[in-house]
Amino acid sequence: MSNESSNIDLKLFIEQFHDFLAPKLDTYEQALYLYIFRHSRLLGLDEVVIGFKSARARMACGIGEKGKPMSENSAYEKLQSLKSKGCIEIVSSERTGRRLRLKLPSEIPGVITSPADEASAVSIEDMDFFSVPENRPFILERESHHCFYCKRSLNSENYVIEHIVSRPEGNNSYRNLVAACRECNNRKNDSSADDFLRTLYRESFLTATELQSCMEKIERLKNGELKPKI
Ligand SMILES: [Zn+2]
């Protein structure tokens, strides 16, 4: 049987492996993945049975304890992590080893991203969610139609987009904007979001827990963890 029977475009495979999959795998996972590939898909086989007790010595060495092959335990651990990353299926455990099925990088959902995907992932950081009217509802949605400060429910007619850090220091990024009711927007004015939240707490508009969670949310906002869905 010749390698041609696999019908694998090896150039494409190596490119996709290194450019997209390898950055998501640690060195042991990479070694395992390539070893499984070598003994299955490269030969045109859908499945392969691998006994890790001996195979581990033929995959890689010197990553953990210097110069030694990976332990059998590590091999099984990394097999599980490859499975959780969608790279392999563990079909069954057999007397001679594990029966495995390997997916090529192009067969693992979300691994190969196009330049267009990457461009749109970057551009949210440059989007103006204040001055561009059609971007404002994304912030309202992110707040689940509630005022960020007093939790009153909002609809598309009565909400305003509010700056956590007021202009001119604050910008129009999703990291600095929340949806709020008109009253909170007027009352907050130029005071800091923290001070305003404490005022609402003192006036019993917020419980201690709500105050705490709002403060944490502001931190997460600044860190870019609360991206609106576009
Ligand atoms: Zn409010």
Image (tube, helix red, strand yellow):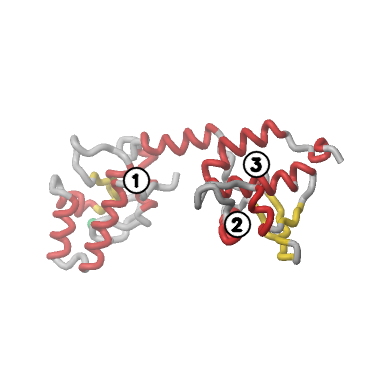
The residue at the point 19 percent across, 65 percent down is 205
Q: Position of residue 91 (x, y in %)?
A: 71, 61
Q: Position of residue 74 (x, y in %)?
A: 56, 58
Please tell me in which quadrant of the rendered image residue 20 appears: top right
Please tell me in which quadrant of the rendered image residue 49 appears: bottom right
Q: The C terminus appears in which quarter of the rendering?
A: top left
Marks 3 and 2 in Cβ contact (< 8 Å)? no
| Label 2 crowd (10 A; few <14 / some 14-19 / many >=20) | many
Amino acid bearing label 2 = Ala
Q: Position of residue 16 (x, y in %)?
A: 62, 36
Q: Nearer the viewer, residue 89 or 198?
A: 89
Amino acid bearing label 1 = Gly
- In the drawing, what numbered circle is on residue 106? 3
Marks 2 and 1 in Cβ contact (< 8 Å)? no
Task: State which tag comes first along the sequence, 2 or 1.
Answer: 2
Height in image: 169 above or below 35? above
Give the residue at the far front of this rendering.
67
Task: State which tag comes first along the sequence, 3 or 2.
Answer: 2
The residue at which mark 2 appears reads as 75
Amino acid bearing label 3 = Ser
Q: Nearer the viewer, residue 46 or 64?
A: 64
Quadrant for ligand 1 reads bottom left
The residue at the point 75 percent across, 42 percent down is 42
Q: CA distance from mark 3 to mark 1?
A: 29 Å
The residue at which mark 1 appears reads as 224
- Disc 1 on helix, strand or loop? loop
